[in-house]
């Protein structure tokens, strides 16, 4: 009996030490980024152009570029993803086509991000001749986040009770009227949560935009959807791998990393708060 | 009036149907493009040379396109990542679902979710400026950027996937089983090891497979920290060059339509098929798990 209790304690200790390893790695990551990044961040850093061959100055073009790309991606994938989710939850029955669609969505979610980059390069940059541009990058990122948006929207739509739909249909509304006036208004916050999470994901992706949108050395801001852009994640990568003055460029990279992390985690935080609020206010 | 009404409904329905088909369309498009751009390579070299060739020198004259070192690089680093991530991730899942108090559970879940949100380039960045130099000093290595560094970072990236899915699987094991085991006099740990984990086994397998998929497809981290040497790695302390890193590194300089360009697309085909296979197997385990847990 004593031996069993001893074993029990040992196991508990083992699990806790595993948790501590994970927590301390996460803590270390944040520690380095926050404490080394905060030293370089100030108003000028956020609002100025890079200077002296990327060894001084700010990261304004990278912030703007990330903004443009993610907005473009969401403009493409939100309407498409939501409509797909509406079909899957509201119209589709259980048949072979729908099963194949679901398998397709699952597998699209598992495609490595660099493969999306190649697809974007072959289709948008070369075949449709958009060049390395905001448009190509946005479309590539849009396809990448599509499965996430479909799943989140589907979850939000199917959380609306069936009785709501039946009540609306019983009043003589058509299917589309029911979706438009009953289902969508009641699931909009869930759909929004999913989209915000997807924006966060798109903002941090690097591999898909390597050959479709990103550039390191540019001296002007993008002026159309066919311009190349600097982006935050690519800026970090380029500062470390293409930079020639590590002593002045690594601090800039720390600052950029902190901005990127704050952006992504900020978006996640907004999404979680929204979700919790939504869960609390809707009790059906 | 009525006819117009139904027509509108029908049109709207079909718009939604078309939208839902786009995912398959994109997946098919990706497959088609990869093969269309990859297959022309085999007009110049044969498949065996490609798959069994031990040297990858795409810019030499004549170029050599042996992908074995790259495949081994990917597998080696992924294996290393799994060795670290599976015990950590599954243990964390067991702790969260079986032992933690609700408050601690929510906190840990939040941390894990935060970990999912961190962009991969950040991991690579920390690998170069912190973990790499640190390992170099600690283990007295010639270079800090090697398979081990990449594996450790990939493990950290795979942990959220493994933990959250395993936790879900463990949590959904029926309470009756656990209570029956405890009623027979088993301790909590004995119940976990002999009842809960075996019952959730296929769910945990799904988690591990998806974590593996994440590690194999990861690009930026390995591109930055794996060291980049296209040789078959013999130990975790040597640099390696996985498939994803090769594509990301060389696509920028490959001339469109050259054999190098086609070779990179062929590499992407291999990567795509491996991740497809992993996903389909994971799906299979998931369906099996759902069936047995009901």
Image: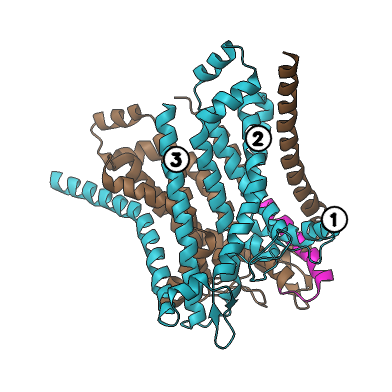
Chain colours: A brown, B cyan
Residue lying at 71% horizontally and 74% vertically, measured from the top left: A242
- Main secondary structure type of the part rendered in magenta: helix
Estimate the x, y position of residue B229 in percent, counting from the top left.
67, 71
- Residue carrying label 2: B91
The mark tally for this picture is 3
For residue A270, which quarter of the picture? top right
- How crowded is the residue under tag 2: few (<14 C-alpha within 10 Å), some, or many (20+)? many
Q: Is residue A218 above or below residue B242?
A: below
Q: Earlier in the sequence, mark 2 or mark 1?
A: 2
Estimate the x, y position of residue B144 in percent, counting from the top left.
78, 62
Q: Earlier in the sequence, mark 3 or mark 2?
A: 2
Mark carried by residue B138:
1
Q: Tell which subunit mark 1 falls on.
A: B
Q: Tell which subunit mark 2 falls on.
A: B
- Mark 1 lies on a secondary structure that is helix
Mark carried by residue B285:
3
Please state the extent of the stretch shown in magenta in the rendering. A242-265
For residue B124, which quarter of the picture? bottom right
Q: Nearer the viewer, residue A171 or A97?
A: A97
Judged left or right of residue B118, residue A123 is left
Mark carried by residue B236:
none
Residue lying at 51% horizontally and 45% vertically, measured from the top left: A194
- Label 2 and label 1: CA atoms lie apart by 27 Å
Question: Where is the C terminus of chain B found, in terms of image quarters?
Answer: top left
Residue A41 lies within the magenta run: no
Residue lying at 62% horizontally and 43% vertically, measured from the top left: B86
Q: Is residue B9 above or below residue B126?
A: above
Q: Tell which subunit mark 3 falls on.
A: B
- How crowded is the residue under tag 1: few (<14 C-alpha within 10 Å), some, or many (20+)? few
């Amino acid at each position: 009996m004593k031996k069993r209790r001893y074993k029990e304690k040992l196991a508990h200790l083992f699990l806790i030490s595993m948790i501590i390893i994970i927590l301390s790695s996460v803590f270390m990551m944040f520690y380095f980024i926050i404490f080394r990044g905060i030293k370089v961040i100030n108003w000028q850093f956020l609002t100025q152009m890079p200077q002296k061959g990327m060894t001084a100055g700010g990261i304004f073009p990278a912030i703007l570029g990330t903004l443009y790309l993610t907005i473009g991606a969401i403009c493409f994938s939100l309407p498409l993803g939501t409509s797909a989710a509406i079909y899957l939850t509201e119209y589709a029955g259980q048949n072979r086509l729908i099963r194949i669609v679901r398998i397709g969505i699952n597998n699209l979610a598992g495609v490595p991000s660099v493969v999306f980059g190649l697809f974007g390069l072959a289709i948008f940059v070369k075949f449709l001749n958009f060049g390395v541009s905001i448009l190509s990058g946005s479309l590539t990122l849009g396809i990448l986040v599509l499965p996430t948006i479909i799943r989140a929207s589907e979850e939000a739509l199917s959380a609306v009770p069936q009785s709501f739909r039946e009540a609306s249909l019983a009043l003589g509304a058509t299917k589309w009227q029911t979706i438009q006036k009953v289902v969508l208004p009641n699931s909009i916050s869930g759909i929004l949560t999913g989209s915000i999470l997807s924006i966060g994901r798109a903002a941090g992706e690097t591999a898909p935009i390597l050959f479709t949108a990103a550039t390191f050395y540019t001296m002007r801001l993008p002026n159309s959807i066919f311009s190349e852009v600097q982006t935050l994640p690519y800026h970090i990568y380029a500062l470390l791998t293409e930079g020639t003055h590590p002593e002045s460029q690594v601090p800039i990279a720390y600052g950029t990393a902190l901005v990127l992390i704050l952006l992504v985690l900020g978006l996640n935080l907004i999404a979680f708060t929204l979700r919790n609020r939504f869960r609390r206010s809707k009790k059906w | 009036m009525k006819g117009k009404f139904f027509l509108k409904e029908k049109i709207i329905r079909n718009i939604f149907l078309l939208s839902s088909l786009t995912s398959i369309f994109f997946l098919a498009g990706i497959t088609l493009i990869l093969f269309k751009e990859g297959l022309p390579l085999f007009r110049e070299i044969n498949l065996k040379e490609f798959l069994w060739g031990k040297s990858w020198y795409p810019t030499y004259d004549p170029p050599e396109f042996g992908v074995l070192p790259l495949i081994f690089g990917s597998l080696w680093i992924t294996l290393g990542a799994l060795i670290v991530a599976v015990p950590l991730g599954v243990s964390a899942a067991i702790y969260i679902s079986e032992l933690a108090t609700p408050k601690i559970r929510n906190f840990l879940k939040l941390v894990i979710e935060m970990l999912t949100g961190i962009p991969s380039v950040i991991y690579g960045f920390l690998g170069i400026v912190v973990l790499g130099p640190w390992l170099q000093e600690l283990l007295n290595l010639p270079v800090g950027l090697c398979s081990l560094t990449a594996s450790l970072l990939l493990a950290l990236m795979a942990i959220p996937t493994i933990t959250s899915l395993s936790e879900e699987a463990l949590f959904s094991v029926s309470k009756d089983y656990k209570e029956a085991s405890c009623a027979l006099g088993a301790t909590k740990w004995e119940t976990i090891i002999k009842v809960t984990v075996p019952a959730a086994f296929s769910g945990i397998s799904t988690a591990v497979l998806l974590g593996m998929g994440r590690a194999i497809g990861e690009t930026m981290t390995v591109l930055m920290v794996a060291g980049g040497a296209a040789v078959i790695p013999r130990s975790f302390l040597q640099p390696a060059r996985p498939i994803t890193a090769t594509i990301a590194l060389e696509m920028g300089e490959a001339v469109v339509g050259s054999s190098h360009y086609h070779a990179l697309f062929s590499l992407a085909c291999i990567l795509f098929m491996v991740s497809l296979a992993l996903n389909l197997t994971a799906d299979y385990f998931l369906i099996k798990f759902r069936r047995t847990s009901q």
